Amino acid sequence: MRIVNGFLISSNHWPLAGSVGLNTNILEINIINLGVVLAVLFYFGKGVLSNLLNNRKRTILSTIRDAEERYEEATEKLKQARSRLQQAKGKAEDIRSNGLAQMEKEKQDLIDAADGDSKRLEESKNYTIRFEEQRAIEQVRQEVSRLALERALESLKNRLNIELQSRMIDYHIGLFRAMEKLID
């Protein structure tokens, strides 16, 4: 503060263009030099500083625009990705529902096939049972016929004597001859 007051006080004592000379006061010279340098810098540096600031402003604006464009691109890509995700979810749901439907169909087909096999086995079993029953009945019939024939033969043996046998033989021979005549 003393320096500034000293400068102002000493400026009152300056002579008005009376003499041009060399000022040896370092403080006064530095302030004047500083003022001249600042004025020159302000005058010539104004354009440079303005250009630097304008370039910086353009760079910042360009960076902001690029960032906004990238943001828009990223937003669009995100929308597309979400859309593809929804499509994939839809396809997955379709595949799952088709799989479940196919599984139910195959399950029903297996049940139907098992029912068909069961019915065929039941029919085969019933056929086998009927066949075995018929065979058993036929065997019983044959056995009954055999036994009846044996009893009849036994009964005939007991009843037949030689005379009755020769009459029966003659009778049957006569039947055979009559049949031969009919055939010829």
Image (cartoon, grey):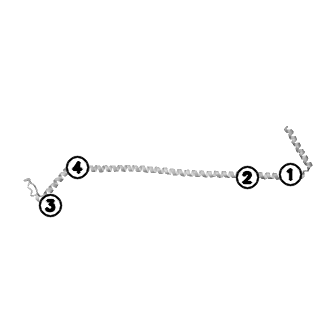
Residue at disc 3, secondary structure: helix
Residue at disc 4, secondary structure: helix
Task: Decide: is 65 above or below 183.
Answer: below
**Residue 113 image label:** none
Name the N-terminal-most of marks 3 and 2.
3
Name the N-terminal-most of marks 2 and 4.
4
Residue at disc 1, secondary structure: helix
Cβ–Cβ below 8 Å for labels 3 and 4?
Answer: no
**Residue drawn at point x = 58 percent, y = 51 percent:** 106
Q: Nearer the viewer, residue 36 or 140?
A: 140
In this rendering, which labeled residue sits more in front, label 3 or label 1?
A: 1
Query: Mark 4 = which residue?
Result: 48
Left or right position of 76 against 3: right
Q: Amino acid at mark 2?
A: Glu
Query: Mark 2 = which residue?
Result: 132
Cβ–Cβ below 8 Å for labels 1 and 4?
Answer: no
Total count of labels: 4
Left or right position of 160 against 108: right
Q: Position of residue 173 (x, y in %)?
A: 88, 43
In this rendering, which labeled residue sits more in front, label 2 or label 4?
A: 2
Q: Amino acid at mark 3?
A: Ile
Query: From the image, which quarter does the N terminus lie in?
Result: bottom left
Q: Looking at this view, name the residue that lies furthest to the bottom.
A: 2
Name the N-terminal-most of marks 3 and 1.
3
Q: Position of residue 97 (x, y in %)?
A: 52, 51
Query: Mark 1 = which residue?
Result: 153
- How far apart are the alpha carbons under marks 2 and 1? 31 Å
Left or right position of 91 against 37: right
- How far apart are the alpha carbons under marks 3 and 2? 142 Å
Query: Mark 3 = which residue?
Result: 3
